[in-house]
Image: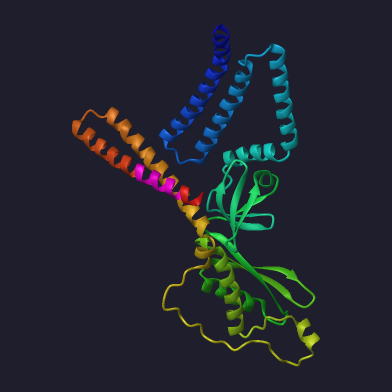
């Protein structure tokens, strides 16, 4: 009987430590669930706290085991060796991505839905995490890029409004420059671009390279507008009887005074509004961008609610207080709806 009591006493302390660790982990989850935060940083903080609790709890659990101090030291040494080896092996990958993830998130270089270019990868951001980001490409497929790669490479962020669309074309020296520039600006305006301008980027042996630029109001149609600009450049140049072919081509083909310009046919106007390719290709990225907009709206509403609460404390007029409290209640209902909508959207994207 006495030996049984000794055994129970010896395992009581480790068991208590284990129960406390489990309770702390459950408490951590409960607190963050009660906060109902829709920010990705809240998830990172929750997981970091859970990891810290687990790590410290493991050490305390080992120290509470009913074994000799020499054995505890050996267990702790073995644990330290495993952790050191893990850090050494993953320092260039996991740890590097973790540090780069915190750096990228703190700098807020780009957000969900943004059009970015990293080396030869171009697409819209869908999801950001502490280890990687997920991008939806032009072909509607997805690519995952480690944060360490992003931190060590330049990231080109396309502006959401008034971004520049451009394209180049090579034309012969026999065509007046002013006529070409006028035609290219007309093509840019026909595409829907604002304030077009032309650069001459190269003087070749047989042709001149012209580059037409224009400002795009809504960059969500970046790729389709780029394609449309190329089409309009061809159409307008051909309408103006400007041949898009180098004199070198004529010399190689050995043709005499023949122009390679197709017959112009007026485009048929679409009866119904067509869905833009971006709406089909970047479906997930657009959903992610909408979620980011809802988060911004949520923060503005929360700030407005706090302002009204401050006015309630300062105001002594009962009628004004009642009016402010009514507005606060409406804002709280709206906040709850937006938070629920964001949580549902996050669940669908997981």
In terms of depth relative to the viewer, which is nearer, 324 or 347?
Answer: 347
Q: Is residue 72 left or right of residue 281?
A: right
Image coordinates of residue 171 in percent, x first then y, are: 70, 78
Can you say whether 269 is above or below 308 in the image?
below
In terms of depth relative to the viewer, which is nearer, 349 or 272?
Answer: 349
**Would you say residue 342 sits in the magenta stretch?**
yes
Can you say whether 221 is above or below 348 in the image?
below
Numbered range of the magenta stretch: 336-345
In terms of depth relative to the viewer, which is nearer, 172 or 224?
Answer: 224
Image coordinates of residue 119 in percent, x first then y, are: 69, 55
Can you say whether 298 is above or below 52 in the image?
below
Where the N terminus falls, by quadrant? top right
- Which residue reaches farthest bottom? 256
Please report the residue visible at 50 percent of the width from the left and 25 percent of the height from the top: 24
Please report the residue visible at 34 percent of the width from the left and 37 percent of the height from the top: 305
Please report the residue visible at 78 percent of the width from the left and 82 percent of the height from the top: 248
Please report the residue visible at 42 percent of the width from the left and 48 percent of the height from the top: 344
């Amino acid at each position: 009987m006495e030996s049984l009591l000794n055994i129970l006493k010896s395992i009581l302390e480790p068991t208590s430590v284990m129960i406390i660790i489990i309770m702390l982990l459950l408490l951590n989850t409960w607190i963050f669930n009660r906060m109902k935060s829709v920010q990705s940083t809240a998830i990172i903080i929750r997981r970091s706290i859970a990891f810290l609790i687990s790590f410290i709890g493991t050490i305390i659990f080992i120290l509470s085991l009913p074994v000799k101090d020499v054995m505890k030291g050996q267990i702790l040494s073995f644990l330290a060796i495993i952790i050191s080896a893990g850090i050494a092996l993953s320092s260039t990958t996991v740890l590097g991505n973790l540090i780069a993830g915190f750096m990228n998130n703190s700098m807020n270089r780009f957000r969900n839905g943004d059009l970015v270019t990293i080396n030869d990868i171009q697409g819209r951001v869908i999801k950001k995490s502490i280890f990687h980001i997920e991008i939806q490409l032009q072909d509607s497929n997805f690519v995952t890029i480690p944060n360490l790669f992003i931190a060590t490479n330049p990231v080109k962020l396309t502006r959401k409004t008034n971004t520049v669309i451009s394209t180049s074309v090579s034309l012969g020296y026999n065509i007046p420059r002013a006529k070409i520039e006028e035609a290219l600006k007309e093509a840019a305006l026909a595409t829907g671009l604002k304030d077009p301008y032309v650069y001459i980027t190269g003087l070749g042996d047989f042709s001149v390279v012209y580059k037409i630029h224009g400002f795009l109001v809504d960059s969500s149609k970046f790729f389709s507008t780029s394609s449309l600009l190329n089409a309009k450049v061809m159409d307008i140049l051909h309408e103006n009887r400007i041949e898009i072919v180098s004199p070198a081509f004529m010399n190689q083909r050995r043709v005499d005074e023949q122009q390679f310009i197709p017959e112009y046919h007026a485009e048929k106007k679409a009866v119904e509004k067509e869905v833009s390719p971006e709406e089909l290709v970047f479906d997930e990225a657009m959903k992610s961008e909408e979620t980011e907009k809802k988060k911004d709206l949520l923060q503005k509403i929360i700030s407005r609610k706090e302002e009204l609460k401050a006015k309630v404390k300062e105001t002594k007029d009962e009628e004004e207080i009642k009016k402010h409290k009514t507005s606060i209640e409406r804002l709280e209902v709206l906040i709850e709806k937006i938070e629920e909508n964001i949580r549902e959207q996050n669940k669908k994207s997981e």
